Amino acid sequence: MADTPAKKEKQKKKEKAKQDKAQKMKERKENSNKGKKLEDMLAYVDEDGNLSATPPDPRNKKTVNAEDISLNVSRPPAEIARKGVVTFYNEAKGYGFITDAKSKESVFVHANQLSEPLKEKDNVTFETERTPKGLTAINVKKV
């Protein structure tokens, strides 16, 4: 039984694919990273935060005192107490809005945060608290 030209062509393609696969496998083995030394795989961080292949110079090491590190953020006292004007207040529902004098930002206020009853156009001082729905005025007092 004689091989047809199509069968010969198909067989040549299979042989070529086999050779290519063997060649790629050989190249991968040669370029493999396995077997490298630990020193070759390490990366160091320099004083500027950049990665380098050489270890940093121990003479340039800076020491930081743990007591000098501050983990909390405090606002200056000037930012804590804000001044504003009551632009809307519904006594029946117990809520309203204060417009900040500096930023002209509208801040929600609830009756639970009031020290005395409010009316519209009252001048007040207040602090703010961030809630999931936005800024809320707390410790509200008439001026």
Image: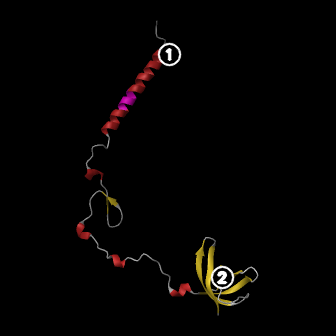
Q: Nearer the viewer, residue 81 or 103?
A: 81
Task: Classify mark 1: helix, strand or loop.
Answer: helix
Residue hosting label 1: 6
Q: Is residue 92 left or right of residue 55?
A: right
Q: How is the image coloured?
A: secondary structure
What amino acid is at disc 2?
Answer: Asn
Dot 1 or dot 2: first in sequence order is 1
Asked whether 102 falls inside the magenta stretch, the response is no
Residue at position x 32%, y 76% from top? 65
Label count reads 2
Q: Nearer the viewer, residue 95 or 102?
A: 95
What amino acid is at disc 1?
Answer: Ala
Give percent across and percent down for residue 17: 42, 26
Q: Is residue 73 left or right of residue 27?
A: right
Residue hosting label 2: 112
Q: CA distance from mark 1 to mark 2?
A: 89 Å
The part of the chain drawn in magenta is 19-23
Q: Is residue 36 above or below residue 26?
A: below
Q: Nearer the viewer, residue 84 or 18?
A: 84
Give percent across and percent down for residue 101: 64, 86
Task: Classify mark 2: helix, strand or loop.
Answer: helix
Asked whether 21 falls inside the magenta stretch, the response is yes
Residue at position x 32%, y 64% from top? 46
